[in-house]
Each structure stands twice: as structure tokens, then as C-alpha cells.
Image: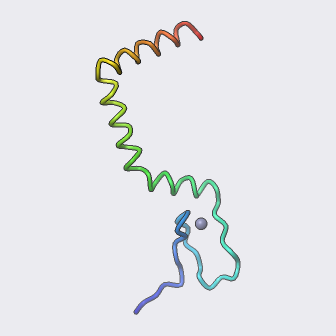
């Protein structure tokens, strides 16, 4: 059975040498990228839901209210 010397880190996805003695520490920016990558379906779904909401009467009202708020410069 083939077993790779390298294993992706479960938290950040970086390829890690399993024989290395050094303890791996996730780079924060890499961690964030990897999390966003893992969440891309949820993010896409959320965007679709927001768009669907904005198409409703309540959503259109809130859009109008927000625009009015911005124009007032408050
Ligand atoms: Zn990591």
C-alpha cells in the first residue's frame, strides 16, 4: 500500500513532511484562505439568499432605506 511522506494539514491544507521533526504552525493567511475555500458553497448559497431576499418587497424597501441613509451622509 502506497503511503505518502507528505500529508496535507487538516487545518490549512499545506503539504507537510510527516518525517519532519519541526512542529507545523499554520500560517494565518493560509488558514483563512483554506477556510474560505472550504466555505465557498455556503458563501455562494448565502449570496443567492441575499439576492433572493433583496428581490422581495421587504428587501426592496431595505435597499431604498439604505440608499436614503447613505445619501443623507449619516
Ligand atoms: Zn496547517
- Quick check: 49 left or right of 39? left
Q: Where is 64 relative to 22, above or below?
A: above
x and y percentages locating residue 44 in the rendered image: 37, 43
Count the labels in the image: 0
Where is ligand 1, by quadrant?
bottom right
Q: Where is 15 relative to 70, above or below?
A: below
Q: Quadrant of the C terminus?
A: top right
Q: Where is 47 relative to 16, above or below?
A: above
Look at 64% across and 56% down and name the residue there: 28
| Residue 52 location, quadrant | top left
x and y percentages locating residue 38 in the rendered image: 44, 56
- Pick the front one: 54 or 1: 54
| Residue 22 location, quadrant | bottom right
Q: Quadrant of the N terminus?
A: bottom left
Looking at the image, the residue that sits furthest to the front is 58
Looking at the image, the residue that sits furthest to the right is 22
x and y percentages locating residue 53 in the rendered image: 33, 28
Q: Where is 59 relative to 50, above or below?
A: above
Rendering colour mode:
rainbow
Look at 53% across and 79% down and name the residue there: 6
Look at 53% across and 53% down and name the residue there: 33
x and y percentages locating residue 45 in the rendered image: 35, 43
Looking at the image, the residue that sits furthest to the top is 72
Look at 35% across and 21% down and name the residue there: 59
Amino acid at each position: 500500500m502506497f503511503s505518502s511522506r507528505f500529508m496535507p494539514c487538516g487545518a490549512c491544507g499545506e503539504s507537510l513532511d510527516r518525517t519532519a521533526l519541526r512542529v507545523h504552525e499554520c500560517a494565518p493567511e493560509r488558514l483563512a484562505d483554506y477556510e474560505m475555500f472550504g466555505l465557498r458553497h455556503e458563501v455562494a448559497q448565502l449570496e443567492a439568499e441575499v439576492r433572493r431576499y433583496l428581490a422581495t418587497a421587504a428587501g426592496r424597501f431595505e435597499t431604498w432605506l439604505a440608499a436614503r441613509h447613505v445619501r443623507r451622509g449619516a
